[in-house]
Amino acid sequence: MTSSPVALINARLLDPATGTETPGGVMIDNGLIVDIGAKVTKANAGERTQVVDCAGDIVTPGLIDMCAFIGEPGASHRETIATASRAAAAGGVTTIVAAPNTNPPIDGSASVDYLMRRARDNAKVRVLPCAALTKGLAGTEIAEIGLLKEAGAVAFSNGPTSVVSSQVMRRAMIYARDFDAIVIHRAEDPELARMGVMNEGEFASRLGLPGIPREAEAIMLDRDMRLVALTFGEGQQGGHYHAQMVTTTLSLEIIAKAKAAGLPVSCATSINHLTLNESDIGQYRTFLKLSPPLRAEEERVALVEALAGGLIDVIISDHNPQDVEAKRVPFSEAEYGAIGLETMLSAGLRLVRSGQVSLGRLINAMTVRPAEILGLPQGRLQKGAPADLIRFDPDEPYVVDPSRLQSRSKNTPFDEARMEGVVKLTMVAGTIL
């Protein structure tokens, strides 16, 4: 740990706002970036400054993960704030937005305060609460959005489930508009998805597993866009709708239409859906049982193209730890979810090496764009910005060893995968973690 001024020198500075890469350094003091560029060198650093020679590695803002499950309260056997923050720091994630589906859910001011106090005492990185959109995440009664925002909630979500009632969802959006709040919603029709365990199609039939159709996501997302037009539309001020995850071409078409109409909407997809497909499930690999399910290869390619073109705004880890007992069972009985904080950057770099996405665009979707949506000052490589920074070598190889992962759970879909991209330094508010 360090509180003295720090100079990161001899680095490749990647600005995610512009996608440009330039040689130089970054001077940090009092938790902020105070200088940046070629003039930041060892000779100009000053006697009190700790100098870190980055040896040509990339320096960029720390990653911001808009959707990660943290087990406190109620599921500390799966993850804790301490273990999640260590995993985040190891993967270059400096800000985590904590999902509200804890036990009890984060649906009251006291719950928000509890999470923030626990994070202050135990977290290495920034942990921000996403509060429940409805009380108890039951989807029947709106939570106290104004009070929760005042308590510190940065966004509102119903966790892994959709708000089925259109009337309740409309009222929630009206309150979000009035309090200028962000609604993060998981779009999935529960009736269509209820009996399925993986993507509906030929591969599911071969495995003898019931499928979830693409339309389950599209139907709910289309409804949401119509409600957005009704509540956030022309002449209205305040509020923003963010699709927690889009995973199909049907959803991409809906989002594109909404953006073309000028609606205040954005969307994310997970790193798993960008880099894996349903065939990776192979012979019933439960670590790849995800919700929404991994899709067909053509859907994955469409998601990558949408990311490269800017239609998809944000990449998330969808970090969802599960213990061994929940995963070492038959596929249809296994719990959904995979950990992802530590491998999100490395997995994303696969898309860069294949030439499908530029490095600047990849980092933009993990830094400045989520910061813009959430209204955070982080995620920027500029003077005066918080010194939440990472240094990484995009070409250094390693093998994912579950026993070395910092997360309490080890259910990674990249178990023993060969990766490239090692994070060598993580800094939050000028402190080297």
Image (cartoon, rainbow, N blue to C red):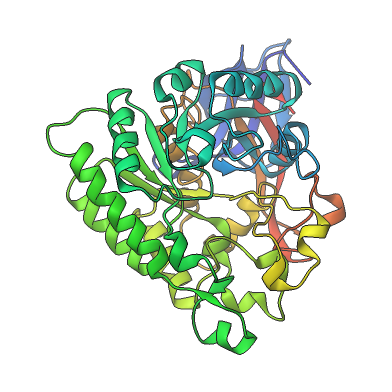
Please tell me which residue is depicted at 56% across the width and 33% down the height of the picture: 24
Instruction: Please give the name of the residue rendered at 46% of the width and 60% of the height, measured from the top-left corner.
Output: 190
Mark yes or no: residue 401 visible.
Answer: no
> Extreme right residue here?
403
Q: Position of residue 191 (x, y in %)?
A: 45, 64
Image position of 274 with respect to 361: above or below: below
Asked whether, in this view, residue 284 is left or right of residue 67, the answer is: right
Residue 180's place in the image compared with 284, above or below, is above
Which of the 4 image quarters holds residue 209? bottom right
The picture places residue 335, in percent across and down from the top left corner, at: 69, 60
Nearest the viewer among 106 and 393 is: 106
Residue 177 left/right relative to 388 = left
The residue lying toward the viewer, choosing from 46 and 406, is 406
Query: Does any portion of residue 355 appear in the rendered image?
Result: yes
Quarter of the figure that contains the C terminus = top right
Residue 401 lies left or right of residue 7; in this view the side is right
Q: Quadrant of residue 115?
A: top right
Question: Residue placed at 56% from the left, 60% from the top?
Answer: 291
Which quarter of the picture shows residue 31? top right
Q: Outermost residue toward the front?
A: 140
The quadrant of the picture occupied by the N terminus is top right
Q: Nearer the viewer, residue 44 or 385?
A: 385
Number of numbered discs present?
A: 0
- Residue 158 lies, in percent from the top left, at 48, 42
Q: Residue 96's spot in the image, x, y percent?
A: 60, 35
Q: In the image, 142: left or right of 36? A: left
Of all residues shown, which one is farthest toward the left? Answer: 235
Q: Nearer the viewer, residue 165 or 162?
A: 165
